[in-house]
Image (cartoon, helix red, strand yellow):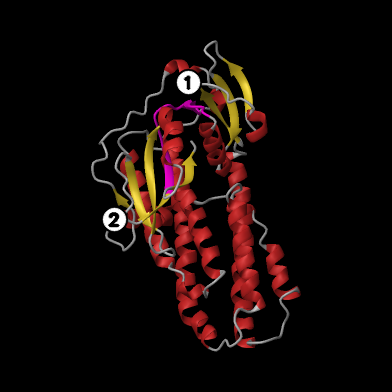
């Protein structure tokens, strides 16, 4: 399968997006971040991590654009559960995605080797999202608003189905690639469960048209990407190997998927824990139990952590990479912190309480 035309379009779009600045609500790099971050790892600690589980330190940065699309989808699911989808700030979210990617690119280009394959993947998903959000913004603010204006009885069955599907989609992509989500089931339900007639028929049929088109295209595109990803990358390992200074007592009860690989004479332990969203849960559980991280996937340099805080939050004492307002939740913002691996446990214990809500630890 040749993806060269798509790749060329993607690169051009990414270069254009990286040149854009000043969008309302875009990521803002924080003044005072050092020009260099020590990305070297301790040879002794790294040698205890099995080679097949070591990953480049730059990945903690490069995973942020992927996870932003999870947060954006989460906002969308919350929003359409209570508001018409025409009011969702599609273009503002695109601005945040691309400006966030620019921040990540600027922060890593002189510190780590350039990973062309990973950047290309980010560009492709960014261009795909730009097309999707751009088309939704145009359609929902013209056709969608027109159908909304003649609706007299609240959300239709199709609106409710779309909201439920959006929530199921978010829960799915926290642990699996989006293209493996089952879009065919909600596509069938539009025609078998939502009914073909009822109150506000204009809105019902407009939603049927829109959701049928959306789910059918995503099902086909997702199938194609699943095949391409399997050929290009194979299956990702679902666990990360960490070096801890100790294994908490009774850990089998609170963190059952923590598996001990080896233990040092000083009590330190090499263990496996789940990746992706579950890694945040395990990092929090281990830190709360008193454990500290010495190495994660072969890295003891910087790891990124995001949190949701109120506007005006006093972030003194934190090394911030960027901050973004939560566009659908006035008064809240996302901050992304740069944390040394050896301080991750202390940061979680100190900061993971109101008004700061720990959102995600960006595993490598």
* 3D distance between C-alphas at marks 1 and 2: 38 Å
Q: Image check: 286 left or right of 294?
A: right
Q: Which residues are magenta?
A: 290-307
Percent position of residue 32, x then y: 23, 41
Q: Nearer the viewer, residue 12 or 65?
A: 65
The picture quadrant where one finds residue 237 is top right
| Residue at the image position 72 percent from the left and 70 percent from the top | 189
Q: Within 10 Å of the Cα at label 1, are there few (<14), some (14-19), or many (20+) other Cα atoms? A: many
Q: Nearer the viewer, residue 75 or 102?
A: 75
Look at the picture and state if 104 lies above or below 136. Answer: above
| Residue at the image position 55 percent from the left and 63 percent from the top | 77
The residue pinned by badge 1 equals 46
Percent position of residue 191, x then y: 72, 75
| Residue at the image position 55 percent from the left and 38 percent from the top | 279
Q: Which mark is residue 19?
A: 2
Q: Is residue 267 magenta?
A: no
Q: Nearer the viewer, residue 332 or 119?
A: 332
Q: Within 10 Å of the Cα at label 2, are there few (<14), some (14-19), or many (20+) other Cα atoms? A: few
Percent position of residue 165, x then y: 63, 64
Residue 224 visible to an observer of this rendering: no
Q: Which mark is residue 197?
A: none
Whether the residues at callouts 1 and 2 have beta carbons within 8 Å, the answer is no
Look at the picture and state if 266 lies above or below 143. Answer: above
């Amino acid at each position: 399968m040749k993806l060269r035309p798509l790749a060329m379009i993607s690169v051009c779009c990414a270069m254009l997006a990286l040149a854009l600045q000043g969008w309302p609500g875009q990521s803002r790099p924080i003044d005072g971040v050092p020009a260099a971050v020590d990305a070297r790892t301790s040879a002794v600690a790294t040698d205890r991590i099995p080679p097949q589980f070591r990953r480049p330190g730059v990945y903690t940065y490069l995973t942020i654009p992927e996870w932003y699309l999870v947060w954006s989808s989460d906002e969308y699911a919350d929003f359409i559960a209570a508001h018409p989808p025409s009011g969702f700030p599609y273009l503002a979210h695109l601005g945040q995605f691309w400006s966030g990617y620019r921040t990540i690119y600027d922060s890593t280009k002189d510190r780590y080797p350039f990973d062309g394959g990973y950047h290309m993947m980010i560009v492709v998903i960014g261009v795909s999202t730009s097309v999707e959000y751009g088309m939704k913004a145009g359609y929902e603010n013209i056709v969608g608003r027109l159908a909304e204006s003649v609706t007299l009885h609240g959300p239709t069955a199709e609106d409710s189905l779309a909201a439920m599907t959006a929530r199921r989609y978010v829960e799915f992509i926290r642990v699996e690639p989006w293209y493996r989500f089952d879009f065919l089931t909600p596509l069938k339900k539009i025609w078998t469960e939502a009914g073909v007639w009822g109150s506000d028929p204009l809105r019902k049929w407009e939603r049927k048209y829109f959701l049928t088109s959306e789910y059918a295209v995503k099902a086909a595109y997702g199938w194609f990407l699943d095949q391409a990803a399997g050929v290009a990358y194979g299956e990702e390992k679902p666990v990360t190997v960490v070096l801890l200074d100790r294994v908490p007592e009774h850990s089998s009860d609170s963190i059952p998927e923590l598996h001990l690989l080896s233990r040092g004479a000083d009590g330190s332990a090499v263990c496996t824990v789940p990746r992706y969203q579950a890694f945040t849960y395990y990092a929090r559980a281990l830190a709360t139990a008193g454990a500290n991280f010495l190495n994660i996937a072969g890295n003891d340099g910087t790891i990124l952590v995001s949190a949701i805080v109120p506007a005006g939050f006093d972030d003194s004492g934190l090394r911030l990479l960027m901050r973004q307002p939560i566009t659908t939740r006035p008064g809240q913002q996302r901050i992304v912190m740069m944390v040394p691996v050896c301080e991750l446990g202390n940061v979680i214990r100190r900061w993971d309480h109101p008004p700061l809500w720990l959102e995600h630890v960006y595993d490598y």
